[in-house]
Every structure is written in structure tokens, then in C-alpha cells.
């Protein structure tokens, strides 16, 4: 019997192992004493989980396995890893269905803690494998954990690549839109420059000729003003166009 509240009270775990446990689960790890093996793992993390739920797997010297959260027996660890497998399959499906950056980011936020948990699971099982090298089951469990870790890593990479592609595509679209706006603004400036002189002359002299020139039967001054204004506008237009061409080159 022991006083630890983390592992079941019915477990006859050596005191050397119990004394190494704190009040919290802590990181995933393996403890060995007197041929007893205690593997501490984390349950698959949810998207909103702030704290990790610990799972304890105890192997007695006579090869009997016990689990604090799953059914006992040597398949308890397999069932633990199967939960990660199902979670990764669900995230893989979400990744295939994602269409925008927010959905890809949501998948990434769920994948990152899963990947970290699997990395530490692999390390804990490797420690167990090194502690009891003659147990072939631990080899298979370690390899399965590594396979899941690799799967999570590839899913994260796929999600990042898709997210980067969307960001690059949006940046390209914004660049093209900015170029179109800039071209439209340039054309408008050229149009304004073309008619600016004639507008200025019309403002100065007026176009109703109530300043003495209206006595002429033919409005030569009016047409002279129009032609002079258009000519000056053409000069300004050519000057701006030439300056823009030099800037681009």
C-alpha cells in the first residue's frame, strides 16, 4: 500500500517508485525499481485542455500489466496508442477539408500538443525498452509510438505548407490589386494633367467672354484659349509619361 493519490491504492508499487512521485503527474517518463516498471503517460490532449491527464501503466516482475485508466493487461498501452491514432485520423480528415487559413490554423493548434505528447511518449517507452531489454512488447510499443509521432509531424508540415500557400496567394492577390489601383490612379493623374491647363485658363479668363471679347462675331480668343490649354496639357502629359517610364526602367 502507498499514500500517493496519483496511482491506484490497490497497486503494490515499490516505495522507491512511489517516493519519486509528486502531487502532480508531471512529464511523461518511466520508473524502474526491483524489476517493477511504471510508465507515466498523458492521455490524448483536447483542443481546450490546459492540463494533461496522466495515465499509469504498471508492469510487475511476473509480466502482469495494470492500467490506472484503461483496462488491465498488456493491451492497455496498445489501447492508449490507438486513441492517439484515432485522434490523428480525425485531424487528418479536418486537414483535408480545410479551405481557409483559419481552419488550417485550428488544425495546427490541435496538432501541436498531440505531437509533443507523442514525442514524450516515444521517449518514455524508449526508457522502458532500455530498462527491460528482454521485453519484446516494449519494442513494438515504442515503434508504434514513433510511427504516430512521425504521422503527427507530417500532418503539421502539411498544414504549415497549406497555410503558407494561402498566405502567399493572398499576398499575391493583394499585390495585383495594389498594382491595378496604382495604374488607375496614374491614368487619372494623366487625365487630370492633360486638362489642367485648359481648366486653369478657363478659370482665369472665363468662357462667357464678358470682358470685351464677346463683341467679336467669331470667338477666336475662345478657340485660342482651348487650343493653348490642350497644347499645354499635352506637354504636361508627355512630361509625366516620360518621367514614369524612366522610373520604371
Image (tube, helix red, strand yellow):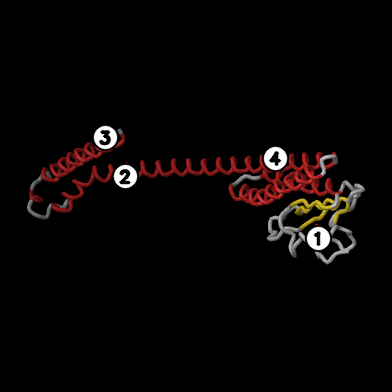
Q: Residue at x 87, y 46 (%)?
A: 75
**Residue under the image location 82 percent in, 44 percent down:** 132
The answer for how far apart the CA atoms under marks 1 and 2 are is 80 Å
Query: Element type at marker 1?
Result: helix
x then y, percent, for residue 88: 73, 45
Q: Between disc 4 and disc 3, whose residue precedes? A: 4
Q: Are marks 1 and 2 in contact (CB under 8 Å)?
A: no
Q: Residue furthest top?
A: 249
Residue bearing the label numbered 2: 188
Q: Quadrant of the C terminus?
A: top left
- The residue where tag 1 is placed is 18
Quarter the N terminus occupies: bottom right
Name the disc covering residue 150, or none: 4
Res. 3 image quadrant = bottom right
- Disc 4 or 1, which lies upstream in sequence? 1
Q: Secondary structure at mark 2?
A: helix
Task: State the separation of the CA atoms marked 4 and 1.
Answer: 33 Å
- The mark that comes first in sequence, 4 or 2, is 4
The residue tagged 3 is 246
Q: Give the vertical position of 9 relative to 104 (above or below).
A: below
Amino acid at each position: 500500500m502507498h499514500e500517493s493519490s496519483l496511482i491506484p491504492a490497490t497497486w503494490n508499487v515499490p516505495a522507491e517508485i512511489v517516493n519519486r512521485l509528486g502531487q502532480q503527474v508531471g512529464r511523461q517518463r518511466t520508473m524502474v525499481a526491483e524489476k517493477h516498471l511504471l510508465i507515466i503517460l498523458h492521455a490524448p490532449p483536447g483542443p481546450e485542455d490546459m492540463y494533461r491527464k496522466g495515465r499509469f501503466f504498471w508492469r510487475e516482475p511476473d509480466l502482469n500489466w495494470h492500467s490506472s485508466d484503461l483496462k488491465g493487461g498488456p493491451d492497455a498501452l496498445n489501447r492508449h496508442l490507438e486513441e492517439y491514432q484515432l485522434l490523428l485520423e480525425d485531424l487528418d480528415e479536418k486537414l483535408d477539408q480545410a479551405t481557409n487559413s483559419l481552419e488550417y490554423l485550428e488544425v495546427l493548434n490541435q496538432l501541436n500538443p498531440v505531437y509533443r505528447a507523442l514525442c514524450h511518449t516515444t521517449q518514455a517507452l524508449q526508457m522502458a525498452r532500455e530498462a527491460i531489454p528482454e521485453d519484446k512488447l516494449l519494442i513494438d510499443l515504442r515503434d508504434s509510438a514513433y510511427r504516430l509521432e512521425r504521422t503527427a509531424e507530417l500532418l503539421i508540415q502539411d498544414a504549415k505548407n497549406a497555410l503558407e500557400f494561402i498566405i502567399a496567394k493572398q499576398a499575391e492577390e493583394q499585390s495585383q490589386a495594389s498594382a491595378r489601383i496604382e495604374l488607375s490612379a496614374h491614368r487619372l493623374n494623366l487625365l487630370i494633367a492633360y486638362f489642367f491647363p485648359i481648366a486653369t485658363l478657363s478659370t482665369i479668363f472665363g468662357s462667357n467672354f464678358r470682358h470685351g471679347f464677346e463683341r467679336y462675331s467669331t470667338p477666336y480668343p475662345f478657340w485660342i484659349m482651348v487650343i493653348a490649354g490642350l497644347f499645354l496639357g499635352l506637354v504636361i502629359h508627355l512630361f509625366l509619361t516620360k518621367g514614369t517610364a524612366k522610373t520604371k526602367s
